[in-house]
Amino acid sequence: MAKQLRIGMVGYGFMGRTHSNAYRRVPNFFNLEYTPVLKAVCARDAEKAKAFADQWGYESIESDWRKLVERSDIDAIDICTPNNLHKDIALAAAANGKMILCEKPLSMNVAEGEEMCEAVEKAKVLNTVWYNYRRVPAVTYAKQLIDEGKLGRIFHYRANFLQDWTISADLPQGGAALWRLDAAAAGSGVTGDLLAHCIDTAIWLNGGISTVNAMTETFVKERKHTLTGKVEKVGIDDACAFLCRFDNGSLGLFESTRYARGHKALYTFEINGEHASIKWDLHDLHRLQWFDHRTPGPLRAWSSIHVTDGDHPYMDHWWVPGLQIGYEHTFVHQVADFLEGVAKGESTGPTFRDALETQKVCDAVLNSAKEMAWKNI
Ligand code: SOE
């Protein structure tokens, strides 16, 4: 019988659902030494926590995360709360010897992130941050191709994350569903919410970022606050674009906005190397576009790899070659990798320390925009 990894989850929103779904599905598709057990879900509103627990099969509920992290029947704390709670929960969980799976971004800023890294490292608890897009099979495959040197020297890295859901000036900020618009809960706007994904993937695929030059804009300057009922200044960035240099000498160009009418979650990246280029698009997530200059002239063309074959990353765990998987599976993959790490006593990337690198770039981007200056990381 598989060993148990008893999960205590804090928060029950969109991410609470993606993680719970992943915990439930992983033992059906991956043969692992450990299996997750949904021990408790925690939310301030006990009624809502109970409804969530019943729906997803959690054994119990808590309404105070401090109690949850002290429970002796829990091995790992999953943090799915707004960003302003990540640090306190993580520090308390680490102090109680719990493993931690933390939603992205790691923290509100670098200073908090550093404290969190020190806490998990001092307590020697396994940790990971849910930058889930690393585990789209096509993205993982891109990593393999780059690591094998198939692209050669990299010249350019280009990424976008475009949405359009906050254009209406009538949309309030703050509260359960809209905390991402409230700087006090989120820390930043698209930089921490969307660009952080692009930066995590970029660092993973192309190495460290050394310097950035950014601009941000807040198009709707005031919004009613759900919690106070008053019209308040908006403190988040609605859009952000930045240029950067990578340690390997390549140049980066990143853009993110929630004001690109028509785009819902268009995360794309393109990498241009000496021998080959690759492109990926979240709206067509099972495909990796590939151009290889070494192909003989008349046949040289962009090709579209359907990353669904048994020898593509993760795909041998799912259906038969050619049949697709999607967004939810990226979380299943992260749980599977985390459980494999637990069996070996190793943290699964991105660890808190890896996510701190992304946080450093986010902070530098926001500072650069504010001061209209290049910033070193
Ligand atoms: C925001 O709309 C959001 O849900 C992010 O918070 C997620 O991290 C991203 O994957 C999709 O968009």
Image (tube, rainbow, N blue to C red):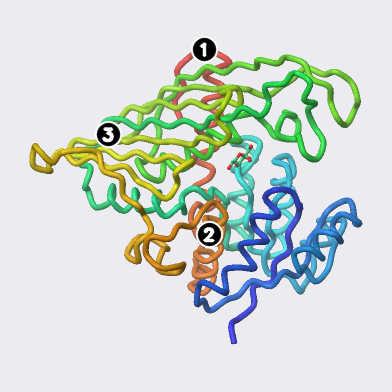
Whole-percent x and y of residue 324?
Answer: 45, 57
Residue positioned most to the bottom: 1
- Crowding at mark 2 (Cα within 10 Å: few <14, some 14-19, many 20+): many
Looking at numbered disc 3 in the image, what kind of residue is underneath it? Asn
Ligand 1 falls in quadrant: top right
Q: Earlier in the sequence, mark 2 or mark 1?
A: 2
Residue beneath the point at 77% across and 25% down: 171
Look at the numbered disc 3 and say if its residue's Cβ is closer than 8 Å to ligand 1.
no
Q: Residue at x 76, y 31 (%)?
A: 184
Measured in 3D between alpha carbons, the distance from the residue under mark 2 to the one under mark 1, in whole angstroms, is: 37 Å
Q: Which residue is mark 1?
A: 372
Q: Earlier in the sequence, mark 1 or mark 3?
A: 3
* Figure check: 108 above or below 28: above
Q: Is residue 253 left or right of residue 17?
A: left
Task: Describe residue 90's horizontal placement relative to residue 173 as left or right.
Answer: left
Secondary structure of the residue carrying numbered label 1: loop
User: From mark 3 to mark 2, how far is it between C-alphas?
Assistant: 28 Å
What residue did someone put label 2 on? 334
Relative depth, front residue between 28 and 299 = 299
Apparent side of residue 186 relative to residue 49 in the rendered image (left or right): left
Dot 3 corresponds to which residue? 272
Residue at position x 60%, y 68% in the image: 25
| Of residues 359 and 242, the one drawn nearer to the viewer in this rendering | 242
